[in-house]
Image: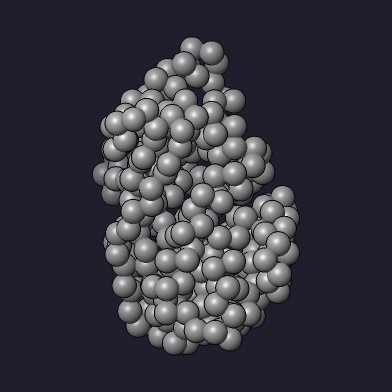
Amino acid sequence: MSTSAALKPAALEPDLAAVKQRQHGAWSSGDYAVVGTTLQIVGEQLCEAIDLRAGSKVLDVAAGNGNATLAAARRWCDVTSTDYVPALLKRGRERAMAEHLAIEFREADAEALPFADAAFDVVLSTFGVMFTPDQDKAASELARVCRSGGKIGLANWTPQGFIGQLFKTIGKHLPPPAGVKSPAMWGTTARLEEMFGGVAAEIAAEPRMFVFRYRSPDHWLDIFKTYYGPTLKAFAALDASGQAALTRDLLTLLEEFNHADDGTIVVHSEYLEAVITKR
């Protein structure tokens, strides 16, 4: 080893437990369900991509307020819905009760699922598990609880899409912890191959578009500042001048992606829909 290499300081490992605690605080703040409910179509489309069959045992991981959960239950599956934010599970229960759907709701950490190996035919996550600090551990858990021949269905925001660029914009004003992988990496086939290639018989991934529709740029900003954890926490951490700068950058980003010309917001946001068949 050269002298210069020996003197070079070792890269510090991120404190993933501390990151998880901060993330838990972010997703517990506001009310993600206000945004989450608008994403329902993604859960429906993912269940169709999987070709979900009635009677399947399905686990929804980091389920939020239950979009994929409800979609699977509507297809007569035996569904367990999990999240580590009790308030979001409560919102999922309320939705299930309104539709008279029999669903089990359990508080659970995506990085340490409280289920036996091969307990489920299908494991789902829509814009949920991608936010885990320890990505490899979470991926390993998804694969562990899925039976051989079963399927793991994921919907993850891509780095180049609108939400991926939203994360990048927030990161310019409030840098993420060093060493923590971007959630948007889950929205790339290369990263899915890294995490699931060793256990997958097949990984089928296709880019899809979700369309955010809001009354105006100010309406979108108000909703995301008030209810969407990452944006809410970013504004809370900045002083007045920092908040003004972030607001300007977010409105610029909206203008770049907005397809509407009538004052409303019609923003196409790319995500990766992936169906992983376990060996």
Q: Nearer the viewer, residue 43 or 112?
A: 43
Which quadrant is the C terminus positioned in?
Answer: bottom left
Q: Position of residue 133 (x, y in %)?
A: 52, 51
Q: Residue placed at 37% from the left, 67% from the top?
A: 274
Q: Position of residue 206 (x, y in %)?
A: 29, 64
**Drawn side of residue 205 relative to residue 117, left or right:** left
Q: In the image, is residue 221 above or below residue 206?
A: above
Q: In the image, is residue 20 above or below residue 150?
A: above
Q: In the image, is residue 194 above or below residue 120?
A: above
**Drawn side of residue 233 relative to residue 2, left or right:** right
Q: Residue placed at 49% from the left, 63% from the top?
A: 43
Q: Residue placed at 29% from the left, 31% from the top?
A: 261
**Drawn side of residue 22 relative to residue 105, left or right:** left
Residue 146 visible here: no
Where on the picture, by quarter, is residue 74? bottom right
**Drawn side of residue 262 relative to residue 173, left or right:** left
Q: Residue placed at 26% from the left, 44% from the top?
A: 2
Where on the picture, by quarter, is residue 195? bottom left
Q: In the image, is residue 243 above or below residue 119?
A: above
Q: Position of residue 124 (x, y in %)?
A: 51, 69
Q: Position of residue 90 (x, y in %)?
A: 73, 55
Residue 127 visible here: yes
